[in-house]
Image (cartoon, helix red, strand yellow):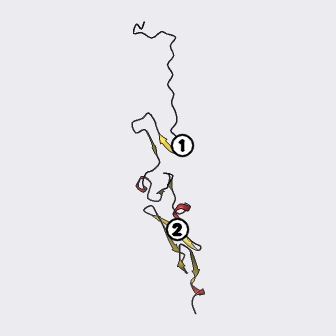
Amino acid sequence: MFTGKFPRSLNIFVIFAPPPPGFFGDPYGRRGCRRECETHSDCSRDRACSAEYKCVDPCRDKAYGVCGENARCDVKNHNAICTCFDEYTGNPFERCYLRECFEM
């Protein structure tokens, strides 16, 4: 019969589990567990939200396509912007060629 008091020998254990893989935060906190990002705006402007819900550099992430040969990649507002280096011309997403090679 329960008297309203717990016996002194009763030990209560609370198990704190880490967030599941791909999530962070406190599972018992007010905001709970969450992914690193759901949309690009969850990341800084020089990062983009990947399909794996992680903030990544779009210039280095294959899913966003990296720039072609002899091209530079700059990130603006979560997007990879490819441009040919100075003195080069062509499609910066595929390959840029030295301008003098095209002059006749």
Q: Give the structural element (helix, strand or loop) at label 2.
A: strand
Mark before the other along the chain sequence, 1 or 2: 1
> Which is nearer the eye, 73 or 61?
61
Write the residue at 51% across / 52% down: 52
Labelled pair 1, 2 in contact (Cβ < 8 Å): no
Amino acid under disc 1 = Pro
How packed mark 2 is, by other alpha carbons closer than 10 Å (few <14, some 14-19, many 20 or more), is many
The Cα atoms of the two marked residues, 1 and 2, are separated by 31 Å
Farthest residue, direction front: 1
Q: Where, quadrant-wise, is the C terminus in this rendering? A: bottom right
Farthest residue, direction bottom: 104
The location of residue 84, given as percent across then percent down, is 53, 75
Q: Quadrant of residue 33?
A: top left
The location of residue 91, given as percent across then percent down, is 53, 77
Q: Can residue 60 be seen from the camera position used here?
A: no
Q: Where 20 sits versus 104, above or below?
A: above
Q: Where 100 sits versus 11, above or below?
A: below
Q: Give the structural element (helix, strand or loop) at label 1.
A: loop
Write the residue at 46% across / 46% down: 35
Amino acid under disc 2 = Cys
Q: Where 10 sits versus 22, above or below?
A: above
> Which is nearer the eye, 31 or 44?
31
Q: Where, quadrant-wise, is the N terminus in this rendering? A: top left
Q: Can residue 68 be seen from the camera position used here?
A: yes
The location of residue 41, given as percent across then percent down, is 40, 55
- Tally of numbered discs: 2
The circle on residue 58 is: none
Residue at the spot of label 1: 21
Q: Nearer the viewer, mark 1 or mark 2?
A: 1
Residue at the spot of label 2: 73
Q: Quadrant of residue 21?
A: top right
